[in-house]
Image: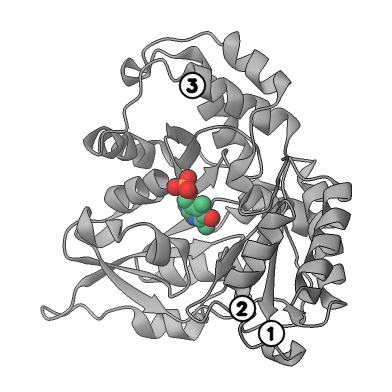
Amino acid sequence: MRFIDLRSDTVTRPTAGMRQAMAQAEVGDDVYGEDPTVNRLQEMAAERLGKEAALFVASGTMGNLVAILAHGGRGDELILGDRSHTFLYEGGGSAGLAGIHACTLPNLPDGTLALDAIEEAIRPSDVHAPRTRLLTLESTHNRCAGRALTPEYCDAAGELAHAHGISVHLDGARLFNASIALDVPPSRLTQGVDSVMVCLSKGLGAPVGSLLCGTRDFVRRARRMRKLVGGGMRQAGILAAAGIYALEHHVDRLAEDHANARRLAEGIGSLPGLVRGAEEDLGRLPETNLVYFKVDGASLGDPTLDAAVLSQRLRARGVLANPLGRRLDQMRMVTHLDVSPEDIEETLVALRSSLEET
Ligand SMILES: *Cc1c(COP(=O)(O)O)cnc(C)c1O
């Protein structure tokens, strides 16, 4: 059975063209800085993201961790959103491995942190307090329905942080989705921040890899930290070739994923028992490729129908999607390279019949 896999955009598989690029990649030992394909990918990423240099890392989690390690030290404090990926889903690495204390602020439904809340959270210079060292933003914001931060917001947050001597890191796992949705070059979105991490292995369709970009000096420190966490790779050009292919062929097409997500959300909006949108932003159509919706079995007269039950029923119909939330009342569907407009129509048919099953 072929599944329509909407669990994440990480499930994409390398295309034939990408595999060919990987097979033909020139390689060397990247710990010695001698892999020409890795070097080319890093130069390309730095240029696209408007930074001096870039570092190829194994995953988004590693990129964010290495950034935190390179920006701060033990006992420092990091300000980040309470729904941010780094806070929720990266194993507590900032505390566990970097020794950096997290100060969380509420993420607003659009993925931002209120500027006055950031300003208030910045610690005074006092022997009692940890030193605020870093602010992390996320765009598109995963748990905030894939919303994209505007360049104006990133600039304003950057200005505020810099006025207090604090650096800004952008978790841009899906920054290219933000760039396509806002129709603004990625380098504009990163103008106000000091470092940015982008994933190649999500909507861009590469099998492995992320890039961490910043100043030359920052990337030099990040390279040391990458080695420290065991992330120095050798003939990684085979993987970097997939990344180059992804940047060359799979960025503009993200618009198709966004159109598919919108179509899916529109369909979901017309199904009884489902309410589209993320928890605090119900009703809204997606801006990018993440489709969140609420499952309200009670409104159909079946309180046992939660997101977990719906997920099982969908699986039996060839559609994979993850239930979410402590009360299992939410679901997320993610569109990507391996999901076609026809798959969206099939998903809507499967949703309708799953809701009608008793
Ligand atoms: C997926 C993701 C990451 C981490 O990427 P991995 O490659 O899965 O480690 C970081 N931040 C955000 C916002 C993500 O969606």
Pick the residue in front: 27 or 298. 298
Residue underneath mark 3: 38
User: Which label belongs to residue 297?
Assistant: 1
Q: Quadrant of residue 178?
A: bottom right
Name the amino acid type tagged 3.
Val
Image quadrant occupied by the N terminus: top right
Residue found at x 66% / y 31%? 246
Q: Quadrant of residue 356?
A: bottom right
Q: Is label 2 in contact with label 1 (beta carbons under 8 Å)?
A: yes
Residue underneath mark 2: 306
User: Which label belongs to residue 272?
Assistant: none
Where 32 falls versus 160 (above or below)? above
Q: Secondary structure at mark 1?
A: helix
Q: Secondary structure at mark 3?
A: helix
Where 163 falls versus 244 (above or below)? below
Residue found at x 54% / y 58%? 192
**Which x, y percent locates residue 162?**
42, 65
Q: Residues within 10 Å of mark 3 (few under 14, many from 20)?
A: many
| Disc 3/disc 1 C-alpha distance (Å) | 50 Å
Residue found at x 80% / y 58%? 347
Q: Quadrant of residue 13?
A: top right
**Which x, y percent locates residue 293?**
69, 74
Q: Nearer the viewer, mark 3 or mark 1?
A: 1
